[in-house]
Image: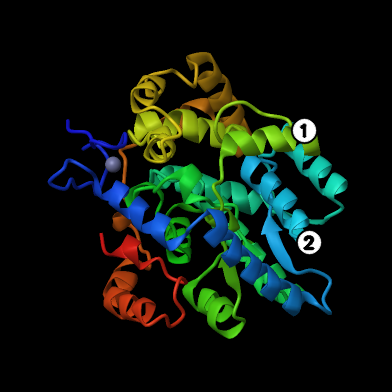
């Protein structure tokens, strides 16, 4: 096994290549993103510009932007930032049935203290449960696709309803790193395809995001996704300290341990079943930025984050909640691993379009809407 000379990514990570200095392509991509998304003074100028745009468009509307909230660090901190920038955001929560009490109270505290309106979308549980089971049966390394796609679709939908042109995202490549494509690929056709193969129900209410709908939101409605944290020297640790102090925020311990389902995914499915330890990605980002010592990070990677007792407890809870027997659940999660290439998706189409999209990005025509880099690998 070979490992990048700079970060923690190694030859077990899909799509990895090393240059003559032993540095991986994810580090190279990270440098490209650093140049394209400056922090500090330059970043502040870019933030001021987009904030000005939002205020102008929002003048005679109830809100300037919409923002998804989960009760986690990033989205809670984002609310604080938006409010301090003088914006009037509408907070939107996608309740998929797996919320912990801590997450719910974190959201409630933040919107109350900051005086922000909250809209909660509650999924049709019977339908959503079936969709989640379909994704477990599909044996893909990203089991949160239904939630991720649902949030995206709802945010666009509400933006249209409120006449808002900016959806603010809590993503930050500085804090999250670059997730390899095979670890987290998702699109509306993949969701539909997996449900058709494994599902027992037709999706009647679930807000999927198919390509034509996406194009409608982006090109006709001109709705932009703004990743404001990308233009800041964002640190999760600092953010946590601030929201604990200012917004009565409670830590739930562990990265993404805000829901039992997510905890089981991050603690067991991803790192053990699929050999895709997300900590490798996030810690690599911190190592590249000099915020974490590489040797210390390598040591942290070997630490156990999820005990066998917790795993068993979570599996019992999840199978019960999904309405299947424990043994059936064990059978489903024990199935052979698959890749998204084995299912229908927009990937082949997007790959074909890559040269055109790259050209458009170069000419700055609708740039930034498609992350073409992901399709060139
Ligand atoms: Zn690297």
Can you give x and y, in whole percent of width and height, for residue 315 in the image?
Answer: 54, 26
Taking the view exactly as shown, the residue that stands out farthest to the front is 41
Q: Residue drawn at (70%, 42%), measured in percent from left and top?
A: 71
Query: In the image, is residue 267 above or below residue 61?
Result: above
Name the residue that disc number 1 marks: 245
Can you give x and y, in whole percent of width and height, for residue 74 in the image?
Answer: 62, 45
Q: Quadrant of residue 177?
A: top left
The image shows a total of numbered marks equal to 2
Which of the labelled discs sits on residue 219, or is there none? none
Tell me the quarter of the image containing the N terminus.
top left
Question: Disc 2 on helix, strand or loop?
Answer: loop
Q: Residues within 10 Å of mark 1 (few under 14, many from 20)?
A: few
- Colour mode of the rendering: rainbow
Query: In the image, is residue 213 above or below residue 327?
Result: below
Tell me the quarter of the image containing the C terminus.
bottom left
Name the residue that disc number 2 marks: 86
Q: Residue drawn at (68%, 43%), measured in percent from left and top?
A: 97
Can you give x and y, in whole percent of width and height, for residue 296 in the image?
Answer: 39, 22
Mark 2 vs ligand 1: CB below 8 Å: no
| Residue 306 in sight here | yes
Can you give x and y, in whole percent of width and height, for residue 227 in the image?
Answer: 56, 59
């Amino acid at each position: 096994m070979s490992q990048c000379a700079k970060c923690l990514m190694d030859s077990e990570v899909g799509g990895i290549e090393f240059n003559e200095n032993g540095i991986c392509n994810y580090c190279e991509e990270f440098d490209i993103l650093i140049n394209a998304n400056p922090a500090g003074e330059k970043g502040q100028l870019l933030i001021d510009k987009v904030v000005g745009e939002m205020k102008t468009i929002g003048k005679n509307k109830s809100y300037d932007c919409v923002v998804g909230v989960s009760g986690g660090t990033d989205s809670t901190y984002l609310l604080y930032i938006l409010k301090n920038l003088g914006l009037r955001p509408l907070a939107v929560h996608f309740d998929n049935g797996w919320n912990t009490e801590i997450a719910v109270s974190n959201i409630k505290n933040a919107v109350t203290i900051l005086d922000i309106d909250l809209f909660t979308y509650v999924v049709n549980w019977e339908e959503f449960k079936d969709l989640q089971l379909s994704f477990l049966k599909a044996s893909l390394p990203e089991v949160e696709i239904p939630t991720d796609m649902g949030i995206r679709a709802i945010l666009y939908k509400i933006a249209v309803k409120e006449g808002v042109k900016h959806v603010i995202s809590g993503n930050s490549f500085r804090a999250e790193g670059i997730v390899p494509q095979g670890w987290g690929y998702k699109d509306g056709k993949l969701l539909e395809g997996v449900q058709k193969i494994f599902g027992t129900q037709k999706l009647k209410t679930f807000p999927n995001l198919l390509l034509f709908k996406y194009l409608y939101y982006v090109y006709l409605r001109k709705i932009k996704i703004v990743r404001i944290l990308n233009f800041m020297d964002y640190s999760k640790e600092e953010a946590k300290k601030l929201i604990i102090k200012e917004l009565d925020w409670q830590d739930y311990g562990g990265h993404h341990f805000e829901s039992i389902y997510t905890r089981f995914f991050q603690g067991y499915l991803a790192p053990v079943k699929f050999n895709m330890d997300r900590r490798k990605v996030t810690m690599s980002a911190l190592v590249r930025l000099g915020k974490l010592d590489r040797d210390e990070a390598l040591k942290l990677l070997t630490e156990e984050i999820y005990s066998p007792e917790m795993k068993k407890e979570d599996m019992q809870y999840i199978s019960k909640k999904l309405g299947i027997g424990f043994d059936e659940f064990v059978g489903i999660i024990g199935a052979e691993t698959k890749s998204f290439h084995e299912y229908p998706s927009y990937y082949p189409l997007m790959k074909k379009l890559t040269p055109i999209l790259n050209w458009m990005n170069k000419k700055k025509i609708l740039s930034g809407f498609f992350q073409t880099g992901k399709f060139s690998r």
